[in-house]
Amino acid sequence: MNRSLYSALLYLISPLLLVYLAVRAFKSPDYRSRWNERFGFKGLQQTDLLLHCVSMGETIAAIPLIKQIQANYPHLTITVTTTSPTGSAAVLRAFSDEVQHCYLPFDLAWCSRRFVKQVAPKTCIIMETELWPNLVHYLKCNNSKVLLANARLSQKSADAYQKRPRLNLPMLQSLDAIAAQSDQAATRFIELGVNKDKVTICGSLKFELDVAPARIEAAKAVREGWQAVHRPIWVAGSVHPGEFELILQAHQRVMQHYPTALMVMVPRHPEQFDTAVTAVKQANMLVARRSLNDDVTAQTQVVVGDTMGELLTLYAAGDQAFVGGTLIEGGGHNPLEPAAVGLPVFVGPHHWDFKEITQLLQAEGALQVVEASEPLAQMLIEFFGNKQAYTMASNAAKKVVADNRGALQKQFALVESLINRKD
């Protein structure tokens, strides 16, 4: 399949994009507006630099890079795009009106062409693996310099790219630079046909977490407000449907050993907040909703973190963490967030989106992979009761994050080289 056939197929299935938006809008009010942006109809100003994220995780990773670009090139106009409401909210919280922001249009040829014609960036930074053939094609038609930043490429994704070389190889070869997160990712890009001179191993921006003292103080205040300073607390972050019941089963098991234990359950997507609360009630457990400022009493067993932008604070308010999307076949989420605040971390077996980071934390004793609800409960009980093992895991988690900083400067150097390049 080449790009022309890809574009034709997208046109054929374009009515399904409307169905997709309608279904998402039914589940989440945040998808009920701004449809014009999804099809490239929002009026936009020309910009010097376009930076495309995906959802909240990629946006949070990109924020330090964007801020460094702003500090060193204050004259540049910047547009930041996302594809999800959570990513959009993260952009607005971080930058307000300092940047132009919209959703990236669907990769229909006419949508991408119109979008690129309006924005016409001199430089474009695309985060991780969010590569779209028509977007990249029209960026290169505009003579934009394109960097794939914080690039990760699992073997599964590399195999998928390999199956359609006529579509994917021209797109990959047209990139001006790739800032790979790891040796493995760099090797996979090169094996796909990317010139090795374009690939630089920079590490992951996700290690550049800024855990400000104010964040830690806010977390302490949260825990004190819950009157839970001396209660065992664990946080199940970014959990998905299919994991809710498993997490609750683990907590019931923990409470058999630690009756005062409190779990903070943070669903990954806002449309699942109500579903999570219902699941807790169906398990006959007493629940408080963070968004409603419900009182957390000695009898409260679960707090549902149904707010946006608070996950790192909630991790810091806990003692241990499970990172969701891993007990189901979801690929997982960022285990560095709880590690950065010194929590021993647990993930399920399906963590391929963060495989290298997971292996690094596991090798240092900061993270354990658990296969199901029961071994998760057993590990939580073990660490609540073994102060020495807990302290070793906590210190290892913070050390891994501290030792692997530096990706920001390496990736910024690549951005600078493209901004200053005259060709």
Image (cartoon, rainbow, N blue to C red):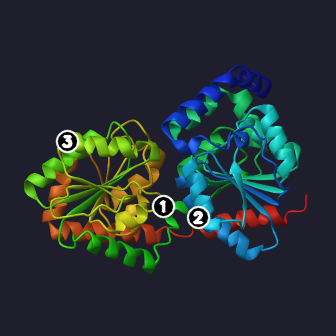
The residue type indicated by label 3 comes to Ala
Q: Quadrant of the C terminus?
A: bottom right
- Say the numbered circle drawn on residue 283: 3
Location of mark 2 (residue):
93
How packed mark 1 is, by other alpha carbons closer than 10 Å (few <14, some 14-19, many 20 or more), is: some
Q: Under tag 3, what secondary structure? A: loop
Q: Residue flagged by tag 2: what amino acid is it?
A: Arg
What x and y, as percent, mark residue 82? 64, 49
Q: Is residue 307 left or right of residue 405?
A: left
| Image quadrant containing the N terminus | top right
- Mark 3 or mark 1, which has the lower sequence index? 3
Q: Residue at x 16, y 64 (%)?
A: 298
Sequence-wise, which precedes: disc 3 or disc 2?
Answer: 2
Q: CA distance from mark 1 to mark 2?
A: 9 Å
In x, y percent, where is residue 27?
48, 37
Query: Which label was assigned to residue 309?
Result: 1
The circle on residue 231 is none
Instruction: Please identify the quarter of the rendering in which residue 274 is found.
Output: top left
Q: Are marks 1 and 2 in contact (CB under 8 Å)?
A: yes
Mark 3, Cα crowd under 10 Å, few <14 / some 14-19 / many 20+, is few
First along the sequence among labels 1 and 2? 2
Q: Secondary structure at mark 2?
A: helix
- The image quarter in which residue 140 lies: top right
**Residue at the image position 79 percent from the left and 61 percent from the top:** 418
Rendered view: 408 above or below 353: below
